[in-house]
Amino acid sequence: MRIVYKYGGSSVATLEKINAIAQRLKFLHDKGYELVVVVSAMGKTTNELITTAQQLSSKPNKRELDALMCTGEIKSITLLAIALNELGVPAVSFNAYQAGIYTNNNHTRAFIDHIDTTKLEKVLAENAIAIVAGFQGVTESGDLATLGRGGSDTTAVALAAALKCDCNIYTDVSGIYSIDPRIYASAKKLDTIPYSDMMELAVNGANVLEPRSVELAAKFGVKLYVGQSLESEQKGTIVMNGKDYFERIIISGIAVKEHISLVSLKLNNVDKRLLYKVFGIIAKSSINLNMVSCQNFLDNTILSFSCSLTQAEEFIDSFKTDADLNEIEINIQKDLTQISVTGTGMSTHTTFIANILKTLTENYIEFSNITNSEISFSFLVMPKYKESAIKVLAERFEI
Amino acid sequence: MRIVYKYGGSSVATLEKINAIAQRLKFLHDKGYELVVVVSAMGKTTNELITTAQQLSSKPNKRELDALMCTGEIKSITLLAIALNELGVPAVSFNAYQAGIYTNNNHTRAFIDHIDTTKLEKVLAENAIAIVAGFQGVTESGDLATLGRGGSDTTAVALAAALKCDCNIYTDVSGIYSIDPRIYASAKKLDTIPYSDMMELAVNGANVLEPRSVELAAKFGVKLYVGQSLESEQKGTIVMNGKDYFERIIISGIAVKEHISLVSLKLNNVDKRLLYKVFGIIAKSSINLNMVSCQNFLDNTILSFSCSLTQAEEFIDSFKTDADLNEIEINIQKDLTQISVTGTGMSTHTTFIANILKTLTENYIEFSNITNSEISFSFLVMPKYKESAIKVLAERFEI
């Protein structure tokens, strides 16, 4: 059976852990599995490399930062391949050039364009384990580019799609929970979850899977399994096509995203004609407008959107260099918490949103910037309201 | 003016040093220099990576070890490029794929086959500094391979040859000395030295330049300058065509190479027919037979050769797996010191070698495994004789 395995940074943080994974892979290889293994950088390596670069430059050149970060995964794949060869298991490491993972040139947040699996197929045909560097791709001009936060999940799912097989993602949590168990101890682990619900949980901050990897999995019908590294039996969560669940599940979980920045602009009727410039800057900064709000009040329009602090600062920098935008009032609120309630079928239960807002106001929890989709409802709170908001919603809706 | 600069590991060991080199390169770039900068891995990085691999495997898979080691140089080139961009100097890093440095697939000791300078020329034409990872190349099958010890010098000279320019090698010593000043304090620094003499000094263990880089420089007529990092004026040594010096210089220096292993085989008349197998193993282990000796005595032949301890162990391993060779007596002496006296014109001064041996025996210094070329004379001593041998020869020949 062909399968893509993915191990995160905490699973390969030490040489001992790498050896343990090598032992596990040898066991599977001996059983006849055809294995492609995607590995992240060891432990906190990526953050350490970024910190090193920032000692030389407050805004490191992105092409160079990408190439620097890629060394983290190359180190972990070669060490895992060395450990496997030592155990007598043929294993071959693949950097992005070798794995044929081609991306666009949007450095630090690149998208995969296509994968040429020729070399991977050749190594699999020779009965060797292919160890692929996660998080990295090659641009058309031959530069290394990284796929953004959690990019190794994206690498794993994209490879599974290209190689037409399932994908197992191993991490330090034992599966997908309705609410992060570190935040709410009574959270339930799910045996299965449809792609759509997983997508909402991921977008809204459940840190187990990255939204892009879930989106890719749904698009190509890749069956995803999420479990704990080195578990002896499958006790995790399967993410799959949800057609069997549409009627059954209503609320699948609550997701929390912290350290959100909210950028707000106050535009008068003259300024409004410059909105095309503002959205131009947003696009250039690759800000994903998942919480955007635009309200008119008397002669003024308030435009606000949430993003990371880095993106907010990047936006402000570009904003300030455009003389036309000088008159516009701009404001940033840092360190807000986004809470999202997700569940397929939410849109068909019309009283649902009103019930959420009622529950929050009954408990004196202040919120702002409400957004909702077919299957999720999100809002921002100050960090002090985080725990109480989760608790009252979980109790009210029996999550 | 176009020029290749090379900085060794000690020159880029810290972020402060990388910043200082970036400042220096900015100064040269502002003056209009067209710069290609070859950088080694920071400080002891390469050794640390090897040690890490050896914790997983006593003999790490060489393809994987090569890819692992290459991360060291990729880290230093990207950090230097980040520092230069921060100073407002356009700089682009090049790994082996990007620099177009193609090698054979002799992992850990690969040879450069050819260099495709298209991308380098493009970046130079855009007035940017090209920062190239030393020590690494790409094999025909797209794998990373390293060039062996001191490979960054080879990278620098090969690039200078391909780009048709001079090459400045910066290190932590201030030039080429007749004898290593750490061993013999009265050693003289040379302003110039012909390729041939430098080659002998390098082959025989002067650790400033690697023999392969000197050979390449001689072959392509690349003018080499060797000096100290960040020196304010050129006070180092120029290595160049030596036709002006053939008559003038006799002894240019004494070189010392430590931790030499000597492998000795005792073969009887029957064993001798197996010599082809012995040399087969030597070739397979890529042992450079620079000190080989073969003597017949009565019915026995003693074959001996010097090499590194790693190579000696590799040789013994292969030797022992061949049942035909079981009867042959084999012996290793570890940790010997090789001393070489070098100088163009040695072969035309016939009394010279006799005078060396006379000086050594007068001073009760025991030696073995004499070898000599047109321009050098080498022998092995036990480490305890190292200092006295250098001292008596330096005094006798006024080096």
Image: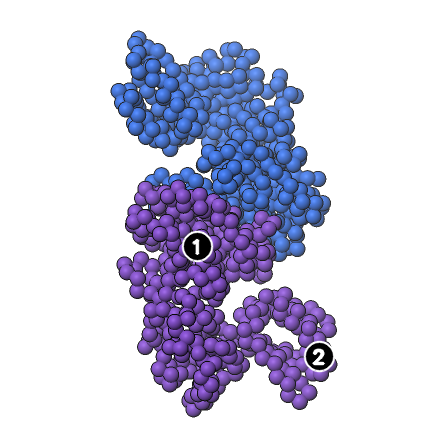
Chain colours: A blue, B purple
Q: Which residue lies furthest to the bottom in this view?
A: B362
Residue B198 at x, y percent in the picture: 43, 70
Q: In this view, does B48 lie above or below A257?
A: below
Chain letter belonging to callout 1: B
User: Where, by quadrant of the figure, is residue A337 drawn?
Assistant: top left
Secondary structure under the numbered disc 2 in the rendered image? helix
Does residue A270 appear left or right of residue A100 in this picture?
left
Q: Which residue lies furthest to the left in this view?
A: A327
Does residue A209 appear left or right of residue B174 in this picture?
right
User: Where, by quadrant of the figure, is residue A246 drawn?
Assistant: top right
Residue position marked by numbered label 1 in the rendering? B164
**Residue at image location 39% in from the left, 71% down from the top:** B244
Marks 2/1 in contact by CB < 8 Å: the verdict is no
Residue A125's label in the rendered image is none
Q: Is residue A311 above or below residue A230?
A: above
Depth check, front residue: B350 or A36: B350
Residue B189 at x, y percent in the picture: 33, 71
Quarter in which the C terminus of chain B is drawn = bottom left
Q: Mark 1 or mark 2, which is nearer the start of the sequence?
A: 1
User: Identity of the amino acid at label 1?
Assistant: Lys
Crowding near the residue tagged with mark 2, few <14, some 14–19, many ≥20 C-alpha atoms within 10 Å: some
Q: Can residue B135 be seen in this view?
A: yes
User: Identity of the amino acid at label 2?
Assistant: Asp
- What's the CA distance linking mark 2 and mark 1? 51 Å
Chain letter belonging to callout 2: B
Residue B271's label in the rendered image is 2
Residue B279 at x, y percent in the picture: 65, 72
Secondary structure under the numbered disc 1 in the rendered image? loop
**Residue at image location 42% in from the left, 25% down from the top:** A283
**Residue at image location 57% in from the left, 16% down from the top:** A345
Q: Is residue B156 above or below residue A52?
A: below
Residue A127 at x, y percent in the picture: 69, 47
